[in-house]
Image: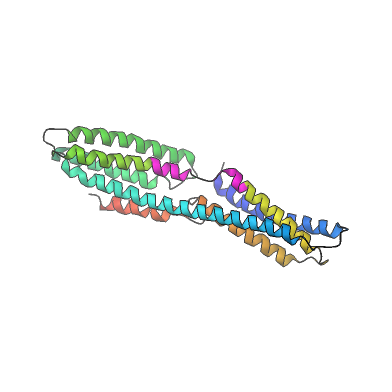
Amino acid sequence: MNFTYLGPLLVISFFFGLLIFLEIGRRIGMASTLGSYAGNSTVNGAVFGLIGLLIAFTFSGAAARFEARRHLITEEANAIGTAYLRIDELPADAQPEIRALFRHYLEVRATTYRHVTDIKATNAKLAEAEAMQKLIWAKASYASHRKDAHPSAARLILPALNTMIDIVTTRKVATENHPPLIIYILLAGLSMMGSLLIGYEMSSDKDKKWLPMIVFSGVMTIAVYFIIDLEFPRMGLIQVQSADHILMDLRKSLN
């Protein structure tokens, strides 16, 4: 499934769905024989209060997860940088090969999530990084236990490597950490019900007012779009890739 096209399609569908429910509500109101629109304020207040609460909840959660993903990139860069510096504790003849592995590993990690919509390519990068982790660990572990290694080599470099490896799993889980789908379904459903109620209220005016309908649908669509964009920051306008330069800058500094 191509998420690049799915996102805009969902946004457009949501916008027109709101317009349709506004019109349905207006026609129901015009066909109603009750003739009174008083007393609906309590129902409207409850529905729109719930919509506002749900929007605030989902937006706050999406923003928090967005910032967490950015911080994890910095943490990974720090972990790799620390492990790289501790290579100095290994025997001199073992250092060049391990440093070269580190540089290649950093290039892989910096580009792993560059095309996140290409699941096969992303999984291939993750698999390559995992293979390199095992290779780096094996060579560093062997070198750190050699007789000519620094006495503290194993105690210094192996925990640093462990942290560097663990952060990869943490980042991978963070990219998959999203609210349950039912939350978004509930948000969409409540928005449609809200449109229905607004349309019903608008039926007291026999002349159709397109501007308020379009404005309401547009505002709700923009709010929901940016919530989803924050939740999936590598697929839309909001991009977490701006933090990836930290890994690339680190790669340039390694020699």
Instruction: Identify the residue at horizontal 18%, vertical 41% (top origin).
Output: 95
Q: Is residue 6 left or right of residue 254?
A: right
Q: Nearer the viewer, residue 241 or 182?
A: 182
- Magenta stretch: includes residue 9: no
Q: Is residue 182 magenta?
A: yes
Q: Does 92 sit left or right of 63 as displayed?
A: left
Farthest residue toward the right?
33
Spot occupied by residue 201 in the image (x, y as percentages of width and height) = 77, 62
Q: Quadrant of residue 224?
A: bottom right
Q: Which residue is nearer to you in this view: 18 or 101?
A: 18
> What secondary structure do most residues of the magenta stretch adopt?
helix
Q: Quadrant of the N terminus?
A: top right
Residue 242, horizontal then vertical, whole percent: 41, 56
- Residue at horizontal 82 percent and vertical 59 percent from the top: 29
Query: In this picture, which residue range is highlighted in magenta?
Result: 169-184
Residue under the image location 67 percent in, 54 percent down: 191
Total labels drawn: 0
**Residue 232 % position (x, y):** 51, 49
